[in-house]
Image: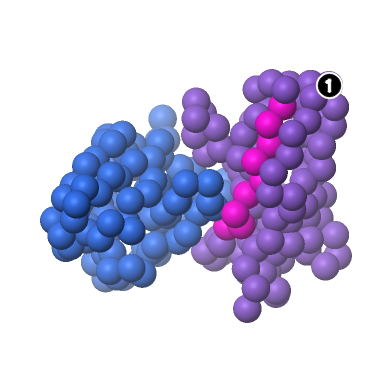
Amino acid sequence: KAGVTQTPRYLIKTRGQQVTLSCSPISGHRSVSWYQQTPGQGLQFLFEYFSETQRNKGNFPGRFSGRQFSNSRSEMNVSTLELGDSALYLCASSWADRPYTEAFFGQGTRLTVV
Amino acid sequence: AQSVTQPDIHITVSEGASLELRCNYSYGATPYLFWYVQSPGQGLQLLLKYFSGDTLVQGIKGFEAEFKRSQSSFNLRKPSVHWSDAAEYFCAVVPKTGANNLFFGTGTRLTVIP
């Protein structure tokens, strides 16, 4: 059974640009969550999607957005990139959202903003 | 305030020695409890979880954790550490009401010396 797949693994972007990251969940999983990991702030929740609907959102500016498709694949977009957006972005999938079922993480996308 | 605390930023142990990583949480009701491990440049791998029932839970790679309600703790243990256990370990919770996402501690980096 394939795990959570995130693409691309590495990205280098320039300040002001926008970026789209992709996440394919484990087959059958309908919930996809995104997390940002930085040395200073640690692991922080961005948002969660279930059946194409955003169910939950963390405390991030509107430049961070996401969506989920009917096949449960998800994308997140960051517009007008800032240096502080440099981070490892992790996607996690789970079978259901409520009651909570365990989440499985992808290997992440390392975004560097220069 | 709700929080997850990992008091040890960095722990060094000798190969073959026992290991205990501490985790305390502050939530009104006992949340779902997790331990994840992250190798450098990789995503998070679930080691074990506690939802209810037996307070001693077994996980993968020979790890176990004990839930102690009176101490609001969920400490991770391993009787004999292997060099391959060197990684960063994260304690995480999901509240049983309200937000349905993982809240992470700041992590404990484990170094294993021969």
| Chain identifier, blue in the render | B
* Residue A24 placement (x, y as % from top left): 74, 62
Work out whether residue B8 can be spotted: yes
Left or right: B32, with B8 as reference point? right
Closest to the observer: A39 or A58? A39
Measured along the vertical axis of the image, is residue A85 above or below residue A106? Answer: above
At x 62%, y 68%, the residue is A3
Closest to the observer: B58 or A11? A11
Which segment did they paint magenta? A105-113
Left or right: B81, with A35 as reference point? left
At x 49%, y 34%, the residue is A42
Q: Residues within 10 Å of mark 1 (few under 14, many from 20)?
A: some
Give the structural element (helix, strand or loop) at label 1. Answer: loop
Can you say which quadrant of the picture contains the N terminus of chain B? top left
Residue A65: image quadrant is top right
Most distant residue in the left direction: B17
Confirm whether the magenta stretch covers residue A110: yes
* Residue B83 placement (x, y as % from top left): 28, 56
Left or right: B106, with A84 as reference point? left
Q: Which residue is mark 1?
A: A16
Most distant residue in the front direction: B114
* Residue B11 placement (x, y as % from top left): 24, 40
* Residue B88 placement (x, y as % from top left): 39, 46
Work out whether residue A34 can be spotted: no
Measured along the vertical axis of the image, is residue B101 above or below residue B6? Answer: below
Could you tell me the amino acid type at mark 1?
Gly
Measured along the vertical axis of the image, is residue B113 above or below residue B77? Answer: above
| Chain identifier, purple in the render | A
At x 47%, y 59%, the residue is B45
Closest to the observer: A85 or A67? A85
